[in-house]
Amino acid sequence: MVTVDGVSFLGLKADGGAVKLLDGISFAAKAGEITAIIGPSGGGKSTLIRLINRLTDPSAGRITIGGTDIATMDPLELRRLVALVPQKPFMFEGTVLDNLQMPFRYRHVPPPAAQSAEVTEVLALARLDRDLLERDARSLSLGQQQRVGVARALITKPQVLLLDEPTSALDRRTSDELAATLREICHGRKLTMIMVTHDLRLTGKVADYCFYLEAGRILEQGRAAELLAHPASVELKRFLSEPSDQEV
Amino acid sequence: MDNQGLVNLGILDLVVAYALVLVAVGLAKLKRIGQEAQMLWASLRMVFQLLAVGYLLHFIFAVQHPLPVLAILLVMGGFSLQVIGARIKRKMPRFYQVVGTALLVGCGGVTFVFCSLVVHYSPWYDPRYLIPLAGMIIGNSMNGASLAAERLGAEMRERREEIETALCLGASARQAAKPALRNAFRAAIMPTANTMAAMGIVSLPGMMTGQILSGTEPMVAVRYQVAIMCAITGAVAITAYLIVMQGYRRYFTKAQQLEPW
């Protein structure tokens, strides 16, 4: 379980001044559930998930994983438990297989071979053809790269998976397939999954819990189905009624 | 010609040589290139700077004391640090500490080893040897250091996305920055490697040419040139390595996060 307790974050403005990007955020994301963070662009969603695997540290508040304050953990150990898939995953030079093996090389453990159970499993989970393994990862389409990013994050079996707009470059069919997979992995492996998304259709399909973040503050939260069906705040009602913001 | 076979240049000889600069200035003016003033200014600066250095060296050679020699080396090192700082617009955090230490260790260490174990002259501070040898080592290391620091900064900025992806996958700061470190080190040592590869075919090196002109046997001059090139390569590599290995840490926090710069 991931708990975020009173977290604030000050960012730097272009003129060097400080601006509050997150303000007193508190929530808990349970193992075996998908928690979706929805809200307009620039509201602090991506910043929030960067704090959870310590790509940056909060200005105030604390984040725990399994009861342990992440500020007391070795950042390398933490990032091996908490995988983050950015919106446009960077592909390292080399083949798709090289990319899937990268996390093992960083850990100084022998990487799995193309025919290994680990590679086979993540290829299936990310809906990737085995033929792609020997392809130059940078020559793939953005949608394929996004799925390689998910596979690369899952291959080391993290306990927490953070996803930033995981389906933004996918067509509707592939997006639905990946959504079903994410749900299956999350429930099957008892993974704690936190997903930042604009895609309300995806949220409705996969999220168990959801909160609405705007201007660095959580304005509303609850069970996803309930929240999307019966929004209480004016801001969320407005957000849900703006079709251009719902799918990117 | 003196009794060692060395042709001394008189004032008139220098005037004739300087006339070649005036030819260049005249051509620039004729073709309206617009660089006449700069060329004249640069050539006059060159003459006065070299005359000043000549008198200073003449004085130091006469005094034969370690303090003025060390002071000269210190000024050379400080000036090279200032030149590197002026060349690089976007400096790494704690730039002068990183580059200054690297120059001190790289150039100081190699100069010490080279003078004491290779050339082994006496006394150790003999300005006739120490100043030109250290000067060549510092001058070349300055270029290497400048390239290493500049390239490292550019690589760290350009590869931010790649570095953060590697950190997300459990890489240490060093593992994440490895491609940037490799490229910065390569950029720093490449000019020295190219110079060595072309030496003797494309150009005759300055030190060797100077020694031959001053009457030294060509094979003795060649041995000196080989030795100094080895020392320069060592100094450039050590200085660049230290800048790269100490410099990349300045871009990360203790929690192995990229600094927001």
Image (cartoon, coloured by chain):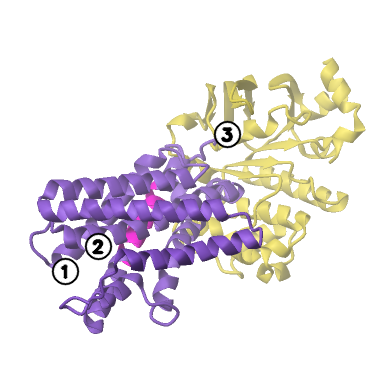
Chain colours: A yellow, B purple
Residue at the location (32% across, 55% down)?
Answer: B50
Q: Is residue A195 visible?
A: yes
**Chain containing mark 2:** B
Left or right of B48: which side holds A140?
right
Amino acid type assigned to the residue bearing label 1 in the image: Val
Q: Is residue B101 magenta?
A: no
For disc 1, the chain is: B
C-alpha distance separating marks 1 and 2: 10 Å
Q: Is residue B214 above or below residue A148?
A: below
- Outermost residue toward the front? B12
Give neighbour class at mark 2: few <14, some 14-19, many 20+ (Cα, 10 Å): many
Callout 1 touching callout 2 (CB < 8 Å):
yes
From this viewpoint, which residue is outermost toward the top?
A233
Depth check: give the residue in front, A113 or B43.
Answer: B43
Q: Any mark on residue B119, and which?
A: 1
Mark 3 or 1: in front is: 1
* Badge 3 vs badge 1, beta-carbon distance below 8 Å: no
* Main secondary structure of the magenta stretch: helix
- Residue that label 3 marks: A52
Answer left or right for A56 relative to B96: right
Dot 3: what SS?
A: helix
